[in-house]
Amino acid sequence: MTVDTAAPAPQATASGAGEHRSFKPRYPAWLALPSLAYQIIFFLGAMAILVAFSFATQTGFNQITYGFSLEQYKAVLDPTYLGIFVRTLAMAAGGTLLTVVIGYPVAYWMARYLGDKKLLALLLIIVPFWTSFLIRTYALKIILDSNGFVGQTLHLDIMYSAWAVGIGLVYNYLPLFILPVFSSLERMDWTLIEAANDLSAKPFSAFRQVTLPLTLPGFVTGALLVFIPMTGEYVVPAILGGGKFVFIGNVIGDAFNSAQNPPFGSALAISLMLALSIFVVIYILVATKEERFGS
């Protein structure tokens, strides 16, 4: 009897046919080189210059001696500048809170109730971005002027005050909050709300337990997109505050331009970025938690 020792030809089995092999296409790394070069030159390079300036010493008008000195950072701790820091963060936090209070209901209304008209509403929100930030702020100055129609009709005299600056902040940054929140609400399954209502959940309870957690990434993203640029705002306090209500961004600008003191301006900028890094870390933690939950 002859024994056939040849290996059997591979055959597709029922289990093998059902196997699913994940295929991940290779991304050509060279496509990222232009963006990487841009970031290295104009972001990391600029950051390195700021750090070098912040440890330098001003030896004369527009003359700098490079080294490792903490004098500029000690000057940042002066009560005058700490007060401006606190005022800036408080105004940015208040402006962000008002933006959330105004923007979230608008995004919710657009995503749930507008239907086919939501894109038109979204377009109307984006339209202000078609004009210059500076022009929009000057237009708001005309509106808020005490001698203008609105000021005389409502008997308002809020120009060059914290109220005018706050209104300018919310007006200019409101779309930056609405867009990511609307995007999160747009992807939401609204049958979950109906299920919560069927289980006798009150509207606020359904919002707190279902809607808000599902839209939290967009909420946090929008809040950061508003809060971070507000803290570095320069135009709004200068125009609507009239120099009487300055932000830390105005102080940084004056240090570089009027005072010709780049080391101190750099120390202020680095200190502000370090303070804002706390909020960025919070965002990363929330985003990571949401990604793990979603996976």
Image: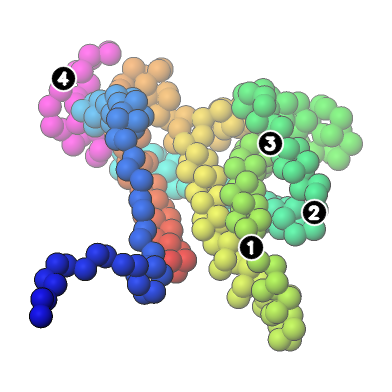
* On-image quarter of the N terminus: bottom left
Q: Is residue 36 in view from this perspective?
A: no
Q: Earlier in the sequence, mark 4 or mark 1?
A: 4
Residue displayed at 43% across by 30% down: 251
Residue 283, given in percent of the width and then of the height, sits at: 43, 55
Q: Which residue is mark 1?
A: 188
Q: Which residue is mark 3?
A: 126
Over which residues does the magenta segment extend?
A: 54-75
* On-image quarter of the C terminus: bottom left
Q: Nearer the viewer, residue 178 or 1?
A: 1
Q: Is residue 97 magenta?
A: no
Residue displayed at 10% across by 76% down: 2
In the rendered structure, which amino acid carries the disc numbered 4? Thr
Crowd band around label 4 with a 10 angstrom C-alpha radius: few (<14), some (14–19), many (20+): some
In the rendered structure, which amino acid carries the disc numbered 3? Ile
Q: Secondary structure at mark 1?
A: loop
Residue displayed at 37% across by 21% down: 256
Q: Nearer the viewer, mark 1 or mark 3?
A: 1
3D distance between C-alphas at marks 2 and 4: 62 Å
